[in-house]
Image (cartoon, coloured by chain):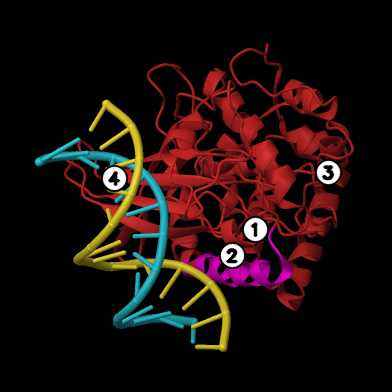
Chain colours: A red, B yellow, C cyan
Amino acid sequence: MVLASPVIKELTEGMEKAIQLKAHMGQEVSGKIEGMMIEGILSSFENALLILKWGGSMEQSHQHVVPSTSMPGSPLSVIGSPKSEDLNPGFTTQPGSRDSSRKRKATPTWTEQGQARTENGMEGPPEDGHSWRKYGQKDILGAKYPRSYYRCTYRDVQGCCAIKQVQRNDENPLVFDITYKGKHTCTPTPRSKSAALSSEKQECNRRHNIAITEYQQQPDVTLNFQTGLTIDIQNIEHQQLGLPLTPEGLGYENHTLAPSALDADNFYSSFPPSFMPSPATPESNHFSTSPCKMSTFGGVQHGQQSESDITEIISATTSVTNSPIIDFPLEQWDFSLSFPFDNPTFFPSFYQFKE
DNA sequence: TTCATTTGACCCCC
DNA sequence: GGGGGTCAAATGAA
């Protein structure tokens, strides 16, 4: 990230002046060659800023989530859902707890699918913003590909019981079936956080090169962002009230953010004070605090707990929403304080790419 | 030195 | 007994 780059500063100023010019000229140039040229100038500025600023890759767009058969139209494949009947936080896989497998059955379990992430010609499972440690791999009878077992990196230090199993889909090797078990209860420690951050930082850098290419190839990601960012306010409010978050049972009040809603002030005001979201984890369009993504949002650093909660909220919501296909991997965008959320022309001008 | 991954072995459930 | 899940030592990477 080169936020302090003089190049960005100059480009930003140039773009602001172009905006001012456009505003000054008003409607009288609308549709005329002058207006189109201003739009083109703005578009060019934004392209350049995007490339310079957003080290976050577009590559995660590959990791769109396959629509679930049970939830037609859902952009997120959540096959099954966290089991509400048992949220036993005491579940442990610590050595010695030989009845762990029985307890494991009682942990909230849900399955998602994500497309393979490609890097350096190699394919890997999609990331989800959490820090996982692989602890095993097993060949599964009848399956072409082995199953990998991951647990939360912070299991030992914080007792976080979240685990996941990742297995390539037999029919479509580009798709990974990911089974999550247990809920993240971890909060990255400073030390661990830095370690996780550095690894994700590398991931960011690795994706950066892909980002520009794919950005050019997939110019409509911003459109998808505009139309597809859906946030379940009701569940958030339930959470605020301390009510249980049940993906299935609640009536959903999905809020799809229109471009105007992405104005920072409007955006924040749409949520309870404690909800300061940051985009996003890959396998869904939920928010996360991955350092690769939005490390600060409005100057606030967010804890892991809220992330995991919000993750559930959005994951659950997207499993039942009929919102347009969300193929916008928010994680790709490296938001910063300089992100022009408050620039109303930012998104409209992106339609230029579509045309 | 620390942390992640690999992999063979072990354990439990069906 | 077979299969799935987990452990833990060995190894590698940063």
Q: Is residue A105 above or below residue A129?
A: above
Q: Is residue A126 above or below residue A319?
A: below
- Percent across and percent down for residue A12 are 77, 63
Residue contact at pointers 2 and 1, CB within 8 angstroms: yes
Question: Is disc 2 in the same subunit as disc 4?
Answer: yes
Residue contact at pointers 2 and 3, CB within 8 angstroms: no
Majority secondary structure in the magenta region: helix
What chain does mark 3 sit on?
A
Residue at the disc numbered 1: A334
Residue contact at pointers 4 and 1, CB within 8 angstroms: no
Kindly report which numbered mark, 2 or 4, lies closer to the viewer in this rendering: 4
Label 3: how many Cα within 10 Å (few below 14, some 14–19, many 20+): some
Residue type, label 2: Gly
Label 2: how many Cα within 10 Å (few below 14, some 14–19, many 20+): many
Question: Is disc 2 in the same subunit as disc 1?
Answer: yes
Residue at the disc numbered 4: A174
Label 4: how many Cα within 10 Å (few below 14, some 14–19, many 20+): some
Q: Is residue A230 above or below residue A69?
A: below
Judging from the image, what secondary structure is the residue with disc 3 in?
helix
